[in-house]
Amino acid sequence: MASPSVSLFLLVSLVFFATLSAAENLYATGLSENFYDTSCPQAASIVDAFVTKYLKKDRNFAGAFNRLQFHDCWVGREAHVNFGLRGVAEIDEIKAALEYACPGVVSCTDILIMAARDATVKVGGPTWTVSMGRRDGVQSTDLMADTNLPFPVLNFSGLIANFAAKGFNAREMITLSGAHTIGRSHCNGILPHLYNFTGKDNVTDTDPAMDKEFSVLLKKLCPQGNRTNTIFIDSSANHFDRLYYKNVLGGRGVFITDSALITDSGGKKVVRSLSKRSSTFFSEFAAAMVKMDNLGVLTGTQGEIRNTCQFVN
């Protein structure tokens, strides 16, 4: 008999295929592609110009902008710019330019959505249509992030549950995990994979499924107890591609959540399919991003338009 996680995986994957086309065109009420055409027609070009500037300096900013957008969408537009996360200062710089051009018009959450899409395209990823008109939340708390974001030590069932709570199925979860093809991380989120996989908290307590040479490399980059070193999440971290899935299949997933994707037979099948040159990863990723863009949207008189993205007005 199939395990509960496999059965759930199969069910939600069927639902995914039935709703993929609809997800691509799903916009929350009050949003539109031309929302700023009159109030700030230069909004998109300003964001694009700044993203281009940042990527010329460091292409890995693409990962930072994707991470910020994920935090914004997952937490509920309430804590979307978190202190300490890379890219925060750059988003505030874009915000300042937009405030100069169109005071009090363009929200921080719309800036994040445009920046993440534009950056993804510029490092070789897919594009997607973005709808505009969101407003910013009026709270920013660590607790909101801690109770919503998926922890980097979740197993496959935990990941399914976290994403299901936001209306995403297993295949979409695996597809959005593909954002790890770009970006970098502090060692803090990686140490449990290397030194505390079963709770022993010692140098030998490494995920046994991890490629041995890869684990040796990671331990050099992230010595036990070092939470501040920074490493790339993917071996082609400045280019959006399918290599992430190939790495996961080869036991070279950086986080426990990466390796967890292939601990379930159904999950492993999807990872394998998305790793292929003929896969639909790009189109599925774009559809999942559109769907994520429409989580917890505030419009009309809800929320506010923040003056600076790190603080409520």
Image: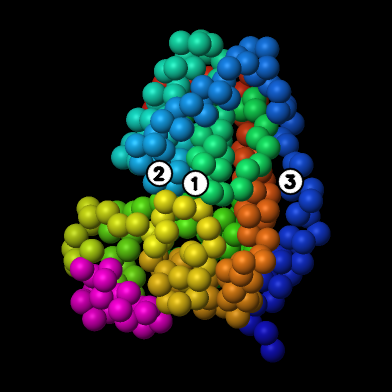
Quick one: SS at disc 1? loop
Which amino acid lies under the numbered mark 1 shown in the image of this protein? Val
Tag 3 near tag 1, CB within 8 Å: no
Residue type beneath disc 2? Arg
Disc on the earlier residue, 1 or 2: 2
Instruction: Tell me where residue 187 appears, x and y as whole percent.
Output: 28, 59
Alpha carbons under labels 2 and 3: distance apart:
27 Å
Nearest to the observer: residue 55 or residue 7 = 55
- The picture places residue 188, in percent across and down from the top left corner, at 28, 58
Label 1 to label 2, Cα distance in Å?
A: 7 Å
Q: Is residue 203 magenta?
A: yes
Q: Is residue 215 magenta?
A: yes
Can you name the residue that lies furthest to the bottom here?
1
Residue labelled with disc 2: 59
The kind of secondary structure element at disc 3 is: helix
Q: Which residue is mark 3?
A: 24
State the residue at coordinates (19%, 60%): 226
* Quadrant of the rendered image containing residue 135: top right
